[in-house]
Amino acid sequence: MVPTGILSKLSFFLMFLFVLSSCVQESGKKQEPVKSAKTYFADCPEFDKDLAYDLIQMQVDFGPRIPGTEAHRACSDSMIRYLEKYSDRVLVQNDKVETYNGKIFEAKNIIASFNPEAPKRILLCAHYDTRPFADQDPLNPTGTFSGANDGASGTGVLLSIAKSISEHPIELGIDIILFDVEDYGQPENVRKYKPDTYCLGSQSWAKNPHVKNYRAQFGILLDMVGAKNAVFPREGVSMQYAPTITTEIWDVANLLGYSKYFDYSVSKPITDDHLYINKIAGIPTIDIIHLDKHNQFRFGDFWHTHDDNMSIIDKATLTAVGQSVIQVVYNFDSTSSIKPRS
């Protein structure tokens, strides 16, 4: 794959790697592509995988973060305090939303901004709520579960990145949004189908952004990004609305040595927060999401089961995602071909 714009030096670097690999083949010595790529890219912080892991554990320790529960309130309050410490501005967007079964919740989207006045911006997002029942669990489908991967992993990665940005300031504007009430969608066994029952927090934000006429060059959504041996294909909605930035991010990840995780295959489209950011807000947004290569409508055997706990979280996977996102952010080229949709 040849990148097309996000890094102005990337094309030259691909040729550099080709020459380097030829020399390696002749010498018989094995090189480490991660070190070579990181040396070539612009300086940026190392992703703190230990902090990310601890921040996932922190969320899980509160218990399932189901909207309307004390665990949900306490966890969101804790994350707000954390982001107030490391970002330039934190806003909390509250909006009443109705779930598929008629329950009303006050969704609490948490928005942390760096360089709030900068015109060029990147949106990073994840959801932090937990599904209220383990409906994919064969033994106990009505019980609650930890949601270490589904919810906490993407949030943990972004919270870790927030601290890195604070300690290594950049001029680019960054907005980190932690969406609420993403995972309260209609279960498969409910007969009368209702559309758009997932991603209620992001739907609310997309209709009413925290800043009037908010624009970002592009957005990156992280969902289920912590499981051991996770695979992230180029997801279908991402390829529909933001194919260039999707491929460029996969190029960066592969150059960093994370090809085990970032697979160039294209998956079926997934309903996730990015769908509504693309459709409603018009911001080209991609989804880094774990998908089972053999069943693209499943997200690992632990998805929405009681096995989604800290035992499946792997620091190597967190590093692959977190470092790739950091490299994209710190190497963003203002002359990139990535433009917001009009």
Image (cartoon, helix red, strand yellow):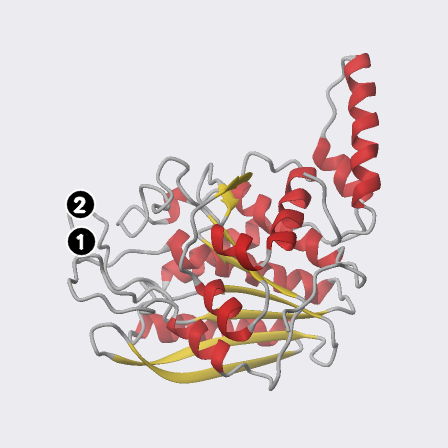
Please tell me in which quadrant of the rendered image residue 31 appears. top right
Residue 127 in view in this figure: no
Residue at x 83% of width, y 26% of height? 19
| Vertical order, 106 against 241 (above or below) | below
Say which of 335 and 52 sits in front.
335
Q: Is mark 2 on a helix, strand or loop?
A: loop
**Residue 205 placement (x, y as % from top left):** 48, 78
Few, some or many C-alpha atoms within 10 Å of disc 1 (few <14, some 14-19, many ≥20)? some
Q: Is residue 98 left or right of residue 162?
A: left
Residue that badge 1 annotates: 141
Residue 138 is marked as 2
Residue 35 is marked as none
Amino acid carrying mark 1 in the image: Pro
| Vertical order, 144 against 79 (above or below) | above
Amino acid carrying mark 2 in the image: Pro
Few, some or many C-alpha atoms within 10 Å of disc 2 (few <14, some 14-19, many ≥20)? few
**Residue 178 placement (x, y as % from top left):** 49, 69
Q: In this view, does 251 lie to the left or right of 209?
A: right
**Residue 173 placement (x, y as % from top left):** 71, 71
**Residue 240 placement (x, y as % from top left):** 53, 56
Say which of 246 and 105 sits in front.
246
